[in-house]
Amino acid sequence: MSEEAKPAAAGKPRRGIGKSLLLTFPILLWSLLMFSRTLMQPGAARKIAALAALALMVTLFFLMVRTRQTFRWRRVFFVALGFLFPLGFIYELIALRGSMSIPVERMLAGDTPFCFLAIPMMILPAALTRTIIFPGSVLPTASNPHAVSLMVALWLGATLVLGKGWCAYGCFFGGLEEGFAAVARKARLRHISPRWRLVPWAVLVAIVLLSAAMFQPTYCAWLCPFKAVTEYPEVNSLETAVQTGIFLTLFLGLVVVLPVLTKKRTQCAFFCPFGAFQSLFNKINVFDIRIDRGRCGDCVSCQRSCPILALDKQSVEAGGTLLSCMRCGACVDVCHKDAAVWHIKGAPVNSAPEKARLMYLYAAWAFAVMFGGSIIANALEKVVGIFV
Amino acid sequence: MHLFAEAALLGLASGPGCLASCGPVLLPALAAQGKGLGGTAGLLSVFLSGRLAGYLSFSVLAWAAGLAAPADPRSRALLFGLVDLSLAAALVVYALAARRCPAAPAPSRLVSIEKRVRPWTPAALGLLTGLNICPPFVVAGARAAETRSLPAAAAFFLVFFVGTAIWSLPLVAVGGLRRLAGVAAVARITLLILAAWYAYLGIMALSWRFSHV
Amino acid sequence: MKRLTSVLGYTAAALTILAAVLLPFLLFNLFIWGVAATGVRIDPLYSGGDPLRTIEKGGYQVVVHQPVWRRSPLERTHSFVQLTWKPVSALPARVSDEIDLDGDGNPDLRAAFDVPSDPKAALRVDVTPLTGRVEPMTGVGKQSFSCLIARVNDSIVLRVPLRAR
């Protein structure tokens, strides 16, 4: 499996259990704090789900610390998030309205939950006209807790902490592709032209310009593949039928079929405009991945392992990754020369890579527990509630 | 003088709307050639000259027929359906030919077509994005028609055009992005995406037209 | 110099961890307040525009909103004016109201629709222009975002396309 992050042949030595437990302790405390309110609420299903989510997050962090591997354990959380979020969301939609489609009445009432994917399209109109071109609400309400201000606040916080690491620790859609990418043992489509990486930027430019010109979130209306697993406007005209056809095709193609065939996150790498937008914030994030040219043997394992093709010959020769790196750790885990390393900007490359990795993981996992962990617990509650 | 002041003010007030209508095409079109500030300014002036040709055509219509645009919805659907499809085709030619596009290499026939039309393509894009009916345009058309003289109508639209064009001058700064790798390629792919959008609009308009015979 | 950049880098890294910890307790509320403080509001295309006038109709009210005009040639929706009848519980079984949109004393349209007792039943409206301000509507339900009638919570929302000005 050249496409997945297998542990390096030489193997990174495992950390002792005692030290691993000690390093995991802050995350255990944090998780208890984050889940405490849920644990104190009535309902056996809720308590069981919260405990299961807590155990999952703490265990995975322990394993990341003990094995000194990041990608494979992070992936367990991320795939769980990707599959459980739609489960919980669709359950709530069916329970609330009996359907995944958004009736126009809900849009008129400002009850459409705001999604982070819409953020890039909101910026120009908000800056020019101080209006949000989305049928939601600015402040949270009883009927719409997922208001614009809350989701923007969440995004701002995630960007501050993670940069483009949002795509590896926060995005509740990316885990779907990551799950499908792990299905096949070998990639059927091996050669992908790296020039396809430019498409997300083009989609970003197109939707930003068209949204500002049309006063409509064009990506949401026309291109979002994840409407297949969340909610979408009622199909009551030729146009809405075309829109539905497009998002179903994009979902099946980019999120299911191509990840299985290529073992890459094809929607993220070759389409998602939010990923391109989020890449810009890697510039201000203090963590990155570097390639120690003194140790690198040019085996290209790191390039082959990257799920979103964020490494190429030029970037490796320059000693780093491309702007699109999402800090998933795949390249570091697969490098058997310890040339690909975690790094803190300003510090010498390879001076204390494990310290850099742990510092990033504390920040990223704290966010992941708070955000993704709560989504996992919420979805698990629905599942457990069937039996309990 | 009063008429021209009115035209200038109307143009300045309409500028943001006009920029919104042509901006999605203009911005990537300026970036796609990978030219510097001077070259981008040249491209912008060719684009605007095409837009001016569109405005002046409408001024002739306004003076001749007393209308800024066909009033019958079916005629409008036919006209703008054809305009949108033409714009989609122009965007594809502009984006695909001359330089290799990541999504599809340029067939040699397309390259030879583009080489012949290249000087005119930005003007065609300007013309085709300029042919739309927006309220300020309708107002300008109605006022031009009231002048009862073709030179006055044309002059009115010329001044109106200058008022709107001022808003697009800052876009010359796009030439400064030339230093960033991949900008021209991204712009070309953006043009292809926009071509798909305008093709859809054109097909829907023509479908509506021919289903309402 | 190298030591200084290294110290700064590690300090920034530590602050990142601190930011992650402070997010749910402090930073979220700060960011939400910040977004709200910018004064942004939902675009009138979706919110229906600010309320302009309220017409008392004996038991219920009709709210006339600010007209929402097309701002760009690429906008897919027509200009419209939104009218809101509320509360639904006070409406008669058949509503037929003449509405003055601009407060000049002359009614601009007549809107007529049945109010079914089933809240999920489809609504249909006939709008007859009395001046040249609006387009007619005959048996319209939810035709488009700028031409519809719908029950929204405890009110009935009508969007009437405006004639180009």
Image: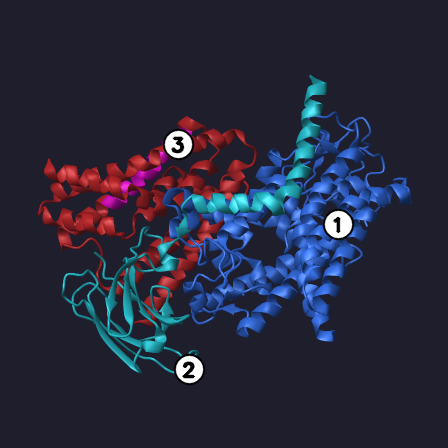
Chain colours: A blue, B red, C cyan
Task: Determine the main secondary structure of the stretch shown in magenta.
Answer: helix
Task: State whether residue A197 appears in this view.
Answer: no
The percent coordinates of residue A139 (x first, y second) are 47, 54
Horizontal arrangement in the rendering, residue A83 relative to residue A97 (left or right): right
Q: Residue furthest left?
A: B148
Count of numbered marks = 3
- Judging by the rendered image, the residue that carries numbered circle 2 is C118
Quadrant in the rendering for residue A179? bottom right
What amino acid is labelled 1 in the image? Arg
Q: In 3D space, how far apart are the residues under numbered discs 1 and 2 (Cα atoms)?
A: 50 Å
Callout 1: residue from which chain? A
User: The disc labelled 3 sits on which kind of residue?
Assistant: Val
**In the picture, which quadrant includes the C terminus of chain A?**
bottom right
Residue tagged by mark 1? Answer: A74
Residue at horizontal 44 percent and vertical 66 percent from the top: A239
Q: Is residue A353 left or right of residue B59?
A: right
Please provide the residue range marked out in magenta. B39-55
Mark-to-mark CA distance, 3 and 1? 45 Å
**Residue placed at 41% from the left, 29% from the top?**
B39
Compare residues A89 and C78 and report the one nearer the observer: A89
- Asked if labels 1 and 3 touch by Cβ distance under 8 angstroms, the answer is no
* Residue A191 percent coordinates (x, y): 71, 48
Q: How many C-alpha atoms fall within 10 Å of the one at disc 2: few (<14), some, or many (≥20)?
A: few
Q: Residues within 10 Å of mark 1 (few under 14, many from 20)?
A: many
**SS for callout 3:** helix
Q: Which residue in the protein does label 3 denote?
A: B172
